[in-house]
Amino acid sequence: MPGELRTLIVISLTAVTMVAEIVAGVMFGSMALLADGLHMASHASALAISLTAYVYARRHACDERFCFGTGKVNSLAGFTGAVLLALFALLMAWESIGRLLNPVAIAFGQAIGVALLGLAVNGLSVFVLGGGAAHDHHDGDREQFSHANHHHEHHDHNLRSAYLHVLADSLTSVLAILALVGGKYLGLNWLDPVMGLAGAVLVARWSTGLLRTTSQTLLDHQGPETMRKAIRQSLEDLRGVHVTDLHLWQIGPGRYGLVVSLTARDPWAPDQYRRCLPNDLGLAHVTIEVHRAA
């Protein structure tokens, strides 16, 4: 299922559930439930950004104004989603500390029912998005190039951002349920704001990781070392060839740009060297500069 369609389905599910949780959180006095609802509200906005990025990238895929295509639009949307995650983590922490200092009465039974509904919806959303995003756990030099089928979604920071948003929603739903059950049956009312604080810390960690990977793409961070070594080796295995300069950077999900300068005793045409490069690295734009060795 394409990332655009997955995101649209999850937006619909999230929007309906967030309204129910926010209303229930206010009515029943649960900080954990209200935090979960507010969390979903921020994520609905972030998912809308993701959907907009997909539509924009598709409509401008052949626009000549974009030198290397619109692949980085997805990374930009993922970066924006990560910033929203970080801001929401701060909001969750602030509100939870306030509830610790000034406790309020909680209608535990009703709040637990709504939290269970939210968890079910979040679980479904994770399933819808997980197929395309669950594989993108690698960043930097740990990213493996050896997979012959570089699928579009394996490096889709936009889909990864959406996946982390609904995963964070699922986490806050679980924490809300644990807090409400502890308050109802064990009298541990302080668990409600404490779980909100714990959720804020975990969401902040996810946000940091996504900010790091998306910013590397947006700033043309040098591609994975394993890929660079494979490219260099494939060229220097040729007789009399020495690579003097190599630049590899990601230009979209699973797509890379490459600029290589090399010297050779008996130079070939650049296209001949291009055909010697590994064909499973997702090299979309390749420039090879050839000089005769002294």
Image: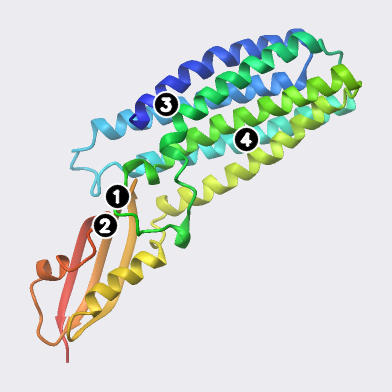
Q: Position of residue 233 (x, y in %)?
A: 29, 75
In the rendered structure, which amino acid carries the disc numbered 2? Asp
User: Mark 3 highlights which residue?
Assistant: 7
Q: Nearer the viewer, mark 1 or mark 3?
A: 1
In the rendered structure, which amino acid carries the disc numbered 3? Thr
Q: Position of residue 190 (x, y in %)?
A: 87, 26
Disc 4 to disc 2, how far (Cα)?
Answer: 39 Å
Disc 4 to disc 1, how far (Cα)?
Answer: 36 Å
User: Mark 4 highlights which residue?
Assistant: 87
Q: Position of residue 185 (x, y in %)?
A: 87, 18
237 sits to left or right of 87: left
Disc 1 to disc 2, how far (Cα)?
Answer: 7 Å
Q: Residues within 10 Å of mark 2 (few under 14, many from 20)?
A: few
Looking at the image, which is closer to me, 79 or 181? 181
Disc 4 to disc 3, how far (Cα)?
Answer: 21 Å
Q: Residue at x 19, y 64 (%)?
A: 287
Dot 1: what SS? loop
Disc 1 to disc 3, how far (Cα)?
Answer: 23 Å
49 sits to left or right of 34: left
Q: Residue at x 71, y 19 (%)?
A: 33
User: Mark 1 highlights which residue?
Assistant: 149
Dot 4: what SS? helix
Q: Residues within 10 Å of mark 1 (few under 14, many from 20)?
A: few
Dot 1 or dot 2, earlier in sequence:
1
User: Mark 2 highlights which residue?
Assistant: 280
